[in-house]
Image (tube, rainbow, N blue to C red):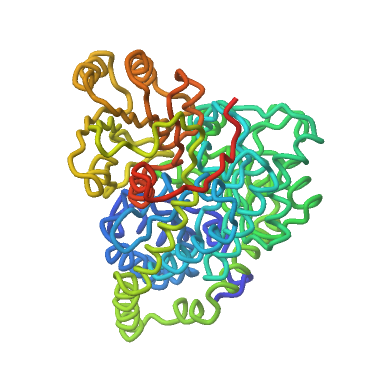
Amino acid sequence: MKPLYDLTLEQKVGQLLMCGFHGQHADEQIIHLIRDYHVGGVIYFRRNVESVDQLTRLSAELQDLAAEAGALPLMISVDQEGGMVARIDKEGMTQVPGNMALGATGNPEYTLTCAQILGRELKNIGIDMNLAPVIDVNNNPLNPVIGVRSYGEHAESVAAHGVAAITGYQLQGIAATAKHFPGHGDTAVDSHLGMVTVPHDRNRLERMELLPFRRAIEAGVDAIMTAHVMFPSIEPEPIPATLSHKVLTGLLREEMGFEGIIITDCLEMHAISKPYGVAEAAVCAVEAGADLILVSHTLQDQVAALEAIVEAVRTGRISEEVIHQAVERIMTWKRKRSGQQMDHLVSSKTNETVEAAAVETVHCAESTKPSASSNRNESMLFKIASSSITIVHNDGLLPLDPEKDVCVIWPEVVQRTEVDEPWSHTESLGIALSQLRGSVREHNITTQPTHAEADRILAEVSESEQVIVCTYTSAGQLPKGQQYLVEKLSENHSLIVIALRNPYDLLEIPRPGSYVCTYENTSTVVKALSHVLTGGLQPTGSLPVRLC
């Protein structure tokens, strides 16, 4: 690896940027950024993924581009949190449970196991950093962006699971990223869309929001991601944490002693881009103490951020020593995780190296195919799912009566959001139940049903003896159409309500006959749920949040 003193200012600043692009192969955007702007980091999204094999080849292709350009090896990242937030949803990538499902098991050993499974698979694909785990303490039922991405509302439990995840990823050579510092759990606004404030005093922050981050630092977490959230008890000026020197340097670096990489959340999110602009925000984030600047989507913004930081150094607004220290932290991580392999990639540009990379790509792709280990994973994940499903209350409606007909109302997740991307191979509850007890009638609705759509369902299930209605909330509050449907069904039926994602759905509906939380609708959870409903499994999950 090149010594730091051999790098130009532009090359150093390039190391501070982590950028996304839009192709499933190296497109003009990422080629331009690597060759001409020396970017040191890449982030993958679903738009980059066709298959696990394709993504493995893409990782090798990008590293080859960096080597051919004489650049340092790339740090390649992804948001693979598990559960409902997973960018890679193809065969060969395990669907591990999300954080709140793991929190409901009460067993951090399960979290460690899941992180190790994911870490191995990500490493095989050529990914170096997972932008996980979320260690926000979700104590606001209306939180539209964290929710089930959190392990729960109890800081000690969140800390224990967070440390387990960090340990699991880093044992597999993947940089873990604890997020979103100093805490995004007690918010009612999505920072993708606007600015939000956490108004609590410092004592409360220490007990709740900051505790998991202190434990993560003690566990040696490689990276911490910032929150675009204002904390007036830490930073009295109306500045989000991402841009605050008091938060990033004063609190995180100096007081809490964090020596790893500070990475920003994406600067294109509206909480930052609208009031500040991406270019100015990039400069402010570096001034505040950030090492790695995330700009996920737009080439114009990515180039503007790079050029603005270079200009800030040239004009004396930012000391080159600040850039030097940030790059040193990034290079320390790159040496730590990849060692001599990186030196080889940087220095060698021969055909032999390209051929070796191709062989390695094939080997990695083969290692991700189904095997005995994947069968073991499947068995373990089913056990975890069974331990996460939570029966909140049951007025004698469960298990299902095998002599009575069953009707399932199933919401189809078709609308993509920043924190909700429907899995491409999720099985519905009606299908899973029919495999255990024969004929089951299922009626599909959207997650945002109109009253007309709900009325049609009401007419179709009016004579049903056992009605299971599944609710699904991804934005903090059960959509009005689903509320209407459950309220009308409750007038004539003793309902079994399954909260497929947000346990807080119970707060928006009349008390049902039985209420069950699954925290996600992934295939393994739905399969386990079908066994619970028919009496084949006794779930042991406990609510990680209060429903009051």
The one nearer the camera, 233 or 499, is: 499
In x, y percent, where is residue 327?
A: 62, 62
- State the residue lying farthest toward the front: 403
- State the residue lying farthest toward the bottom: 352
In x, y percent, where is residue 278?
A: 51, 38
The N terminus lies in which quarter of the figure? Answer: bottom right
Q: In percent of the image, x 66 and y 38: which residue is there?
A: 241
The image quarter containing residue 32 is: bottom left
Classify 167 as above or below 418: below
Q: In percent of the image, x 61 and y 42: which residue is there?
A: 136
Q: Tell me if residue 103 can be seen.
A: yes
State the count of labels: 0
Classify 289 as above or below 400: below
In the picture provided, is 129 more to the left or to the right than 406? Answer: right
The one nearer the camera, 538 or 118, is: 538
Classify 321 as above or below 428: below
In x, y percent, where is residue 438?
A: 19, 44
